[in-house]
Amino acid sequence: MGQLMEKYIEDAEKALLHTYNRYQIVLDKGEGVYLYDLEGKKYLDFVAGIAVFALGYGNQEYNDTLKGQIDKLLHTSNYYYNVPAIEAAKRIKKLSGMDRVFFTNSGAEAIEGAIKAARKYAFLKDGTTDHEIIAMNHSFHGRTMGALSVTGNAHYREAFEPGIGNIKFADYNDFDSVLACVTDKTCAIIMETVQGEGGLTPATEDFLKKVRALCDEKDMLLILDEIQCGMGRTGYNFAWQKFGVKPDIMTSAKALGCGVPVGAFMMNEKVGRNSLVAGDHGTTYGGNPLACAAVNKVLEIFERDDIAGHVQEVGPYLWEKLDELMAKHPQIKEHRGTGLMQGLVFEEPVAPIINKALENGLILINAGANILRFVPPLVIEKADVDAMVAILDKCID
């Protein structure tokens, strides 16, 4: 590492709150599916800012849209309408099939809004505030207090208890476990359609359909977290669309803005008419013209260029190549995931492999100590998969 990069890392450790164990590189710019550090070293990126930069780096159409909006208007607050927010809301409704949209600044904020909408829906039915929400073990929904409260990992929660309360945890893909948690106070069930941080595990069609039917039977709301697995990553605009199991409330973020901090929660008309009203929820920055100009352009490109269709072509190729890698290396115990959201489970921690990959110009991250996670830009080609596997093969050796 050169002196310039060392100096910046030293300054960062003195100035930034140490809540991340960062890799020892300072990234400077990106181009296509490659990132470059301050010293000009080139890295093939199979992280995409944790499933964010779906369109890759330096997309000129996207960049020009943001530059144009910066010169026009950045912020107004939500006391006024703005055209980018209106256009973005129309596009995301079309892509998702949902009816009402609320723009946030992050995925965690989208989860907070989803929880509030579910509890308000239940409150309006019976006037009580002791309703329960069922979440899933090994889930991850965010770091704010509400999102943390429905995150199914006790380690993340223990120092910050008590959370928002009245949360029960069931086992993912185990319908009997969900049934055991249901009471007459249950108002919602929340889950990721594909668990991300919890190990790249997709919900099964049978599980999703049974949970959907249960919610219909008891007038409970199904909340699907599509923050990481949505926006084309599984080969569908949103992962639930593969099975046609439509949620009552859905959250989105990450690739929704492709780098601009933005999220959203969406709901069907039933929830829209019977939950949050003026004064119940708000955000100063949420839905600002800059963020929504990004969303609008991203959604336009996704639809026009059929990004989800491209994932359906490249995702199986990545699966095939990772399967070949698993057959070659006995320390790889399992291959999980779908689309361009896949993971390899190793018998030992993968940190040494990630560090070795960095040295060899490949950016990877984990999902739990023993799982390598692959969430590249959605515009990667088969040649990029080949290049990644060639480097990873050597690093595992």
Image: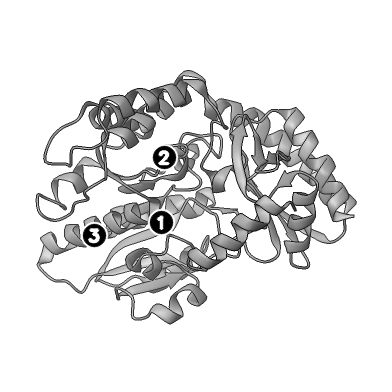
Amino acid, disc 2? Val
Instruction: Give the side of residue 2 with respect to residue 20, left or right.
Output: right
Residue pictured at 43% horizontal, 81% vertical: 159
Q: Residues within 10 Å of mark 1 (few under 14, many from 20)?
A: many
| Cα gap from disc 1 to disc 2, whole angstroms | 33 Å
Amino acid, disc 3? Lys
Q: Is residue 22 above or below residue 224?
A: below
Amino acid, disc 1? Val
Looking at the picture, the colour scheme in use is: one colour
- The residue tagged 3 is 116
Viewer-proximal residue, 23 or 188? 23
Residue 343 at least partly seen: no
Quarter holding the C terminus is bottom right
Q: Tag 3 or tag 1, which sits nearer the N-term?
A: 3
- The residue tagged 2 is 260
Residue pictured at 74% horizontal, 50% vertical: 358
- The residue tagged 1 is 211
Viewer-proximal residue, 291 or 311? 291
Q: Secondary structure at mark 1?
A: helix
